[in-house]
Amino acid sequence: MNELAQRLGEYRGEIITSIVETGAMLGWSLLAAVLVGLPMGTGMYLARRGGPQERGWLYAGLNGFVNVVRSVPFLLFVVALIPFTRWAVGTSFGTTAAAVPLSFVAVALYARWVEQTLVDVPRDTVELADSLGANTFQLVTRFLYPEARSGLVLSMTTVTISMISYSTIMGVVGGGGVGDFAIRYGYQRYEYDIMYVTIAVIVVLVMLIQTFGTRLSMAIDHRSR
C-alpha cells in the first residue's frame, strides 16, 4: 500500500494534468450541448409530426444529424472528423482538438434527450399556452422549459456521464485525460494497480455526478412539492 501511495505521489503532476485535461474536454463539450443541443432538441420537438410548429423538412434535417452522429462508432467518428477538427481549431492533436468530436456527440445526445423530455410534457401545457396567445418563444421559455426542467437536468446528467466515458478514448488524438493516464501509466507499463485506482476514481466521480444531478432534479421538480 505504501509503495502504491509512493508511486501515485511520483505521478502527481501527470495525474493533475490528466484531471485538468478531462475537465477541459468535458467543459467544452457540455457547453456545446447546452448552447447547441438544447435549442436543437427543442426545434426537433416543435417541428416533429404533431408538434406545435410542425415542419417536416426541419425535423428531417435535425433528426438526420442526430442519428448519424449517434450511429457512427465513436473512435471512427473521431478519425473521420480529423480534417474538420484541423480546419476548426488549427490542429488535430491535443485537448482542444479532442473537444471537437466530443462536442458533436454531446450535442447529438442532449438534443435527443431534450426532444424526448419535451415530448413527455403534458399536452395540456401546450394547449394552455396556445389559449393564452403565447408565441413560440414564450411557449418554450415560459411553459415547456419550466415544466420539463427536472427532466432536462437528468438528461444533462446522463450526457455528462457519457462524456466522461467517451473522453477516455481521446488519447488517440493526444487529448489526454484520466482515461488516457490509466492506459499509459497503468496498462502499458504493467502497473495495473495504478490503472485500478484510476478506474475507481472515475467510478466515484460518476457516482457523485449522478447523485448531484438526481438531487438537483428532485429539488426543482414542481411535481414533488
Image: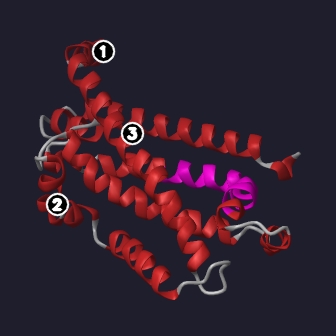
Q: Which residues are magenta?
A: 140-159
Secondary structure at badge 2 equals: helix
Of the residues under marks 3 and 1, which one precedes in the sequence? 1
Residue type highlighted by circle 2: Phe
Q: In the rendering, at what x and y percent does residue 37 appear?
A: 47, 59
Residue type highlighted by circle 1: Ala
For this view, does 19 lie left or right of residue 161? left
Q: Nearer the viewer, mark 1 or mark 2?
A: 2
Q: In which quadrant of the rendered image does the C terminus lie?
A: top right
Q: What label sits on residue 84 in the rendered view?
A: 2
Residue nearest the observer in this picture, 158 or 148: 148
Q: In the rendering, at what x and y percent does residue 187 appear?
A: 19, 40
Crowding at label 3, few (<14), some or many (≥20) Cα neighbours within 10 Å?
some
Cβ–Cβ below 8 Å for labels 3 and 1?
no
Q: Nearer the viewer, mark 3 or mark 1?
A: 3
Q: In the rendering, at what x and y percent does residue 125 appear?
A: 81, 68
Q: What label sits on residue 5 in the rendered view?
A: 1
For this view, does 159 lie left or right of residue 121? left
Q: In the rendering, at what x and y percent does residue 194 appear?
A: 27, 30
Cβ–Cβ below 8 Å for labels 1 and 2?
no
For this view, does 205 lie left or right of residue 221? left
What is the C-alpha distance between the residues marked 3 and 1? Answer: 30 Å
State the residue lying farthest toward the right: 225
Q: What residue do we see at 51% from left, 87% from top? A: 56
Q: Which residue is mark 3?
A: 27
Residue nearest the observer in this picture, 1 or 15: 15
Q: What label sits on residue 169 in the rendered view?
A: none
Relative to 173, say whether 77 is above or below. below
For this view, does 56 lie left or right of residue 73? right
Q: Is residue 83 visible?
A: yes
